[in-house]
Image (cartoon, rainbow, N blue to C red):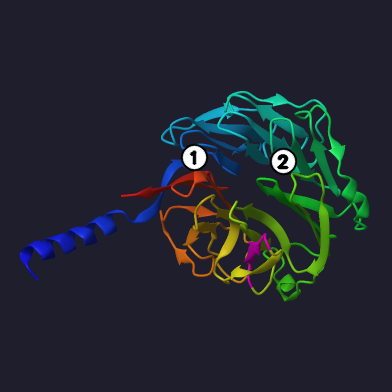
Amino acid sequence: MTFGRLAAALLLISTALAAEEHWDIQYRYRVIDSTLTINDLVFASEKRGIACGYITDKREKDKPVVLITSDGGAKWIETPVKETGLAMHFLDDSTGWMVTEKGIWKTIEAGRTWTKLGKSPAGMLRVWFLTRDHGFAAGLQKRIFETIDGGETWVPLDILKEIEASALYTTFGEISFSGDAGIISGWNLPPRRGGPDWMEPENAKRKQVPHYSVFLETRDGGKKWIKSEASVFGQVTRISLAPQGIGLGLVSFRDVFEVPSEVMRIDMRTGKSSSAFAKKDRAITDVRTFSGSTRALLAGYEPSGPIYNSPIPGRLKILTSNDMQTWTDMTVDYRAVAHSAIIAGPDDKHVWVATDTGMILKLVQD
């Protein structure tokens, strides 16, 4: 090999190494005697991002807060709000909705100000708007609502009458759309005796038992819903659908199980699903697919032992795949820990991850 070819080869290698993707902490809440819990994160564009959650002071008093950035996360501004946001959905980089325990709020200023929708239902966990007028909200007590007038009025879905499960213990915890195709997932989970496994080690001998789960699917923007029911282990807590007709669904298991979570690959064209990822040392809490891309991302944490739901946060773990079969751990700032992580971003090149421990990380290339 000539010197020129050797130099060119070394240049290609160095360029590839320099372009390696990794996750850096972009924001970290560091205030003495208080903590920040981030419940949700949205980036509707490369520049504008919004996180919602609450700050807990040394007296264990919670204060609702929203974090806003207009420069891609270089600077975050704390904005007080009247109620703690549980989840958000944004139609563009300025218009969005936020679910709280008591209702649904709307912003048209990228989270700077919020207005409560006067007749919005309480007890919702997720919200999704297809247009500024047409949206859905789902939550506790077997309730799903639809609005076609921007939230002025909310009407229960008729298909709920076909679900026989008790309203007391039935929760609809996720909504996901890709165009007119959408899925709403729910589960019926009666309480059981005993506390969580980390508090009562003897409970570690308890076995998971299957329970009732229900899925509502539409292919026409909610004009018609198709119901499917099953007795399964775990709850489908997160769904991400892509226009390519594929998606990911996250099954979370409560307390002790063979694995803390399992990720399912969803084929919207056939309606079939298959296992995509499940490992004992990876508790996944969010999944993400992207429009026009083969990339998929998983985010979660590394459990510290056989009890997955420990009060001690684990190291943040983020995995990537181009085929939803082979997954690779990405390089993550060693200081990042979490009980839960959320993925957000407008495309596969501009992505952020927020943790419930008050951190926001950005996907970067050096």
Asked whether disc 1 touches disc 2, contact meaning CB atoms under 8 Å apart, the reply is no
User: What residue is pinned by disc 2?
Assistant: 127
Spot occupied by residue 363 in the image (x, y as percentages of width and height)? 42, 49
User: What residue is pinned by disc 1?
Assistant: 29
Spot occupied by residue 4 in the image (x, y as percentages of width and height)? 8, 62
**Quarter-wise, where is residue 127 in the image?**
top right
- Measure how far apart labels 1 and 2 are at the Cα level: 27 Å
Mark sitting earlier along the chain (1/2)? 1
- Report crowding for label 1: few under 14, some 14 to 19, many 20 or more residues within 10 A (C-alpha): some
Q: Nearer the viewer, residue 282 or 270?
A: 270
Q: Nearer the viewer, residue 327 or 26?
A: 327
State the extent of the magenta-drawn residues as a range.
Answer: 259-269
Q: Nearer the viewer, residue 209 or 11?
A: 11
The disc placed on residue 150 is none
- Principal secondary structure, stretch drawn in magenta: strand
Mark 1 belongs to which amino acid?
Tyr
Q: Is residue 20 above or below residue 221?
A: below
Q: Nearer the viewer, mark 1 or mark 2?
A: 2
**Quarter-wise, where is residue 87 in the image?**
top right
Q: Is residue 200 above or below residue 364?
A: below
